[in-house]
Amino acid sequence: MPVYLDHAATTPVDVRVAARMADILRSETEYGNPASSSHGYGDVAGALVESARTQVAAAVGASAAEVIFTSGATEANNLAIFGISHYYRERGRHIVTARTEHKAVLDPCRELERRGWKVSYLVPDKEGLLDPAQVAAALRPETVLVSLMHVNNEIGVVQNIAAIGAICARHGGAWLHVDAAQSVGKCPVHFASLGADLMSLSAHKVYGPKGVGALVISQRGDSGGRGRVQLTALQFGGGQERALRAGTLATHQVVGMGLAFEIAAQISSVETARVAHLQQRLWQGLAALGGVLRNGSATRSVPHLLNVSFEGVEGESLVAAIRRQVAVSTGSACTSALAEPSYVLRALGRSERLSESSLRFGLGRSTSEADIDVAIATLTREVGRLRKVAGAMPAA
Amino acid sequence: MNYNDLTRAYFESDASAGELTGPGVFRGAAGNHAQGTWVQFDLQLTAGMVSAAKFLAFGCPHTIAVAAWLAEQAVGGQVVPQLPESVQALRDRFAVPVEKMGRLLIIEDAWLAAVIPALTIARAPT
């Protein structure tokens, strides 16, 4: 198998997490419905879920009562955006987001536009960063939601959420939703300090299982007199999760997420320092090729992501050339046989060609110096070969 | 994207990649880098036969593989005013998705741009 450098897409499940989940699946006492309160089986499962809720909350600086389990960050984003927009639809029908958000935010916003809502799409600077003043300028009296990600999933830049949160609080009518799927374990995340009202989380980005995530919903009162943030549920059926997300919780999934978040919180600082060293090694090795451009801010980003464009090579050929040696994500989305250049990189001002010939390296716990060296050697060989086949590039 | 074995083999081989110079060399190119596909062929003619052929290609693996295969196939053959195989046959041989048919037409344009002047010279009365 190729070297795995796609940890931003997903991570392998931590062996401790997998073992605990398997224990629950095999257990003769932990299989109860966590919502069943009429017998001990339900009590046991319910206690496991609440323990996991506490673990998740502790890892992100929230209280357990603020955590609603979902099927993942995509569902959490949908619940936040549609839940807020429906509940506050009489107050206003305007949302602020950014062009570089994940599709799990952009697509719900586009659906709201089809329903008559107005959406302002902020454009980041060429390093991928938003100026909080852009948010302030975009807010209108009828704005009910600002939805911005903490760490960008393609380029790893970290937005100044705390400053944006303060702006939203002063506005008095706009709730702040933060997609933090890429943040946990990569940089400090403290829900209350960020000033966010809602925050989406994913387990499988943090060495937990796929199929589980959470939406953190603030329970603090707002100094501007808005009270607590309220949502309309999107699915109904059993009143679980404070009646915001009906459906029987998968105990083993939730427990896996809780343990994964607890482990991430324990080792985050040491691991981030180790990964930063590897990222630097990777960047220096690739930069030595020449004609290699780094995408996104190098200083305000997590070290777990490195996104680079390679001049003089075509994107699909670059991916085909390295895929047997290195597993990475590309700067294009293959919707058919023809690739679409990354809209995130296009928003940063990169050309179509450079956007397509970009690679996202996602470093993680299993990444070693040897893996980095394989990636550098592979890219050096294959980029050199493709450039030779392409001949001299015309001047831009 | 998946590629058939022939596409992968010719994509990964750069034996015919490069340029030719000197007398009897005819060059043709088509496409452009900004649009994502550019192909160039150099054909060297000796006594009406292709004695050497090279290609350069900026494009997807199918584009590179087909161009490499054409350059290899050309050596030792006569110059004729068409591809050694039709575009449809090349598409079948390399399992090129229909969305990429335009890229095969660029390859054909580059090929003809090299072949037609060569043919004119080869047929010119001496």
Image (cartoon, helix red, strand yellow):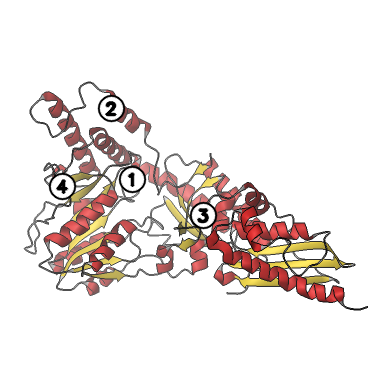
Q: CA distance from mark 3 to mark 1?
A: 21 Å
Q: CA distance from mark 2 to mark 1?
A: 26 Å
Q: Secondary structure at mark 1?
A: loop
Q: Amino acid at mark 2?
A: Leu
Q: Are marks 2 and 4 in contact (CB under 8 Å)?
A: no
Q: Amino acid at mark 4?
A: Glu
Q: Quadrant of residue B31?
A: bottom right
What subunit carries mark 4? A
Q: Nearer the viewer, mark 3 or mark 4?
A: 4
- Percent of width and height locating residue A385: 66, 56
Q: Secondary structure at mark 3?
A: helix
Q: Quadrant of residue B33?
A: bottom right
Residue A185 numbered mark, or none: 1
Label 1 CA crowd tier, 10 Å (few <14, some 14–19, many 20+): many
Q: Secondary structure at mark 4?
A: helix
Q: Is residue A44 left or right of residue A19?
A: left
Residue A283 numbered mark, or none: 3
Q: Nearer the viewer, mark 2 or mark 4?
A: 2
Residue that extends furthest to the bottom in the rendered view of this protein: B125
* Tag 4 residue: A66
